[in-house]
Amino acid sequence: MTRGLRELLDRSPRERAELGLRGRALVERSYTWGRQAEKLAGVYRWLAGGGSRPEAIEAAA
């Protein structure tokens, strides 16, 4: 963790800003309430026997 923080702090302000923008875009694209609701609905459909296993479900080994 210390190494990761040091690497981040060693980047230029511009690089850190770009990382922040990319991180925000990822969250807005993948982790909105709407996207999470879609994922949960996919799980319920799968549990009810409709379709393939959603990516949100890990197969037990």
Image (cartoon, helix red, strand yellow):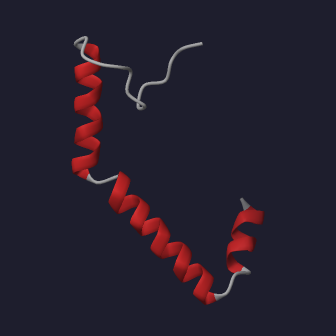
The percent coordinates of residue 3 (x first, y second) are 78, 64
- Quadrant (top left, top right, bottom left, bottom right) of the C terminus: top right
Residue sitting farthest toward the bottom: 13
Lateral position of residue 13 relative to residue 35, left or right: right
Q: Please report the residue visible at 43 percent of the width from the left and 60 percent of the height from the top.
A: 26
Q: Please report the residue visible at 37 percent of the width from the left and 52 percent of the height from the top.
A: 30
Q: Please report the residue visible at 41 percent of the width from the left and 31 percent of the height from the top.
A: 56
Q: Is residue 57 above or below residue 37?
A: above
Q: Is residue 45 above or below residue 13?
A: above
Residue sitting farthest toward the front: 51
Q: Is residue 36 above or below residue 61?
A: below
Q: Please report the residue visible at 24 percent of the width from the left and 22 percent of the height from the top.
A: 44
The image quarter in which residue 57 lies: top left
The percent coordinates of residue 40 (x first, y second) are 27, 33
Please give the count of numbered marks on the rendered protein: 0
Lateral position of residue 13 relative to residue 5, left or right: left
Lateral position of residue 25 relative to residue 32, left or right: right
The percent coordinates of residue 54 (x first, y second) are 37, 27
The percent coordinates of residue 50 (x first, y second) are 24, 16
- Quadrant (top left, top right, bottom left, bottom right) of the N terminus: bottom right
The image quarter in which residue 2 lies: bottom right
